[in-house]
Amino acid sequence: MLELYDGGLDIPSILKKWYCQESTQNYGAFIPFVGTIRDEDGIDGLSFDIYEPILEKWFQGWQDKAKEKNAIIKMAHSRGDVLVHQSSYIAAIFSPKRRVALEFIDLFVEDFKASAPIWKYDLKNKKRIYALERSTRIKGSGLLGVST
């Protein structure tokens, strides 16, 4: 399940919803990861643009990998502005075995940072400034990728 929200994420609500959806499915592990906007470099927050068709395809590939291990992945991400100390990203793995969930959450979050078609901007003084120094070139992006 991939969910996109405008603005910061309501983490308690999302985690509760996901837990309730899966609590009777006989999963032995529920491992969430929550990403929070840090107060650094004088930013007021971050802003995100998402290319949804590629994100959905990327996410489905991960769901297929998880299904091979009888696991599922859930993810939520923000569109637009998210202020400092708010969350913009949450992912969770549900699995019958904890080892599968622990391994998948690490691989999934790292690949998300490297491959998801999400562009990040710093919010400073009511301006959106592309965060080039913290961006990762998307594999196969050609002209659309960040120059290195």
Image (tube, rainbow, N blue to C red):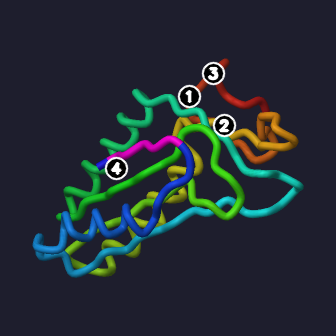
> Which residue is nearer to you in this view: 142 or 76?
76
Q: Which quadrant would residue 125 be assigned to in this image?
A: top right
Residue 5 included in the magenta stretch of the image = yes
Earlier in the chain: of badge 4 and badge 3, it is 4
In the image: residue 58, left or right of residue 35: left
Mark 4–mark 2 Cα distance, whole angstroms, equals 19 Å
Q: In this view, does 57 lie above or below 109?
A: above
* Range covered by the magenta-colored residues: 2-6
Residue 142's disc is 3
Residue 15 visible here: yes
Residue kind at label 4, given as amino acid type: Trp
Element type at mark 2: loop
- Mark 4 packing: few (<14 Cα in 10 Å), some, or many (20+)? some
Whether residue 137 sits left or right of residue 4 in the image: it is right
- Quadrant of residue 101 in the image? bottom left
Residue 88 is one of the magenta-drawn residues: no
Could you tell me which secondary element the residue under label 3 belongs to? helix
Q: Distance between the residues labelled 1 and 3?
A: 6 Å
Amino acid type, mark 1: Gly
Closer to the chain start, of discs 3 and 2, is 2
Where is residue 41? Give x, y as percent: 88, 56
Residue kind at label 2, given as amino acid type:
Arg
- In the image, what residue occupies the spot 20% across and 56% down? 67
Provide the secondary structure element on which disc 1 rests.
loop
User: Could you say which disc has been placed on residue 140 in the image?
Assistant: 1
State the mark number for residue 62: 4
Q: In this view, does 103 lie above or below 43?
A: below
> Marks 1 and 2: which is nearer the front?
2
Can you identify the residue that label 2 sits on?
137
